[in-house]
Image: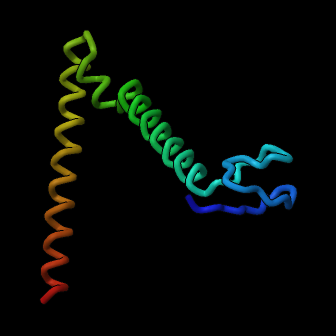
Amino acid sequence: MSIRRIKCPNCGVFNTNKDYCENCGHLISYQKKRELKIKAEKQKQIKEAIHEIENPNLAERLKRHPNIFFRVLGWVIYSAITVVSAIGAGLAWFIAMVAAG
């Protein structure tokens, strides 16, 4: 097993094979920091997904409204957004093809 000596950036004490500083308790292991950062990023993505599910956009809320008028309005808005997106994608593709020669 290799010996790791890491200097604590907080207090300057050298620690041997430790994840946390013996003197001040500061996290000094780079591997542990990386794991905590990945875990925090995953939690952030989960929170964003939950927020997206719990807070749908206007068209999605109107499509599930109990009143038929608002449901129809929701589908019209949703369809308009889809058509505009398709036209935009087609234009972007066309411009890319013209630019490519």
**Horizontally, is 48 left or right of 96 in the view?**
right
Residue farthest to the top, as pictured: 66
In the rendered view, how is the structure colored?
Answer: rainbow
User: Foreground residue, 41 or 100?
Assistant: 41
Nearer to me, 54 or 31: 31
Q: Residue at x 18, y 77 (%)?
A: 96
84 up-or-down from 7: above or below = above
Residues 97 and 58: in front is: 97
The answer to which image quadrant residue 15 occupies is: bottom right
Instruction: Specify the quadrant of the image occupied by residue 87.
Output: bottom left
The residue at the point 41 percent across, 27 percent down is 55
Q: Position of residue 5 (x, y in %)?
A: 71, 62
The quadrant the N terminus occupies is bottom right
* Frontmost residue, 32 versus 36: 32
Q: Position of residue 83 (x, y in %)?
A: 15, 48
Q: The C terminus lies in which quarter of the figure?
A: bottom left
User: Image point 69% across, 50% down: which residue?
Assistant: 18
Q: Position of residue 22 (x, y in %)?
A: 80, 46
Q: Is residue 9 left or right of residue 19?
A: right
Residue 57 x, y percent position in the rendering: 35, 32
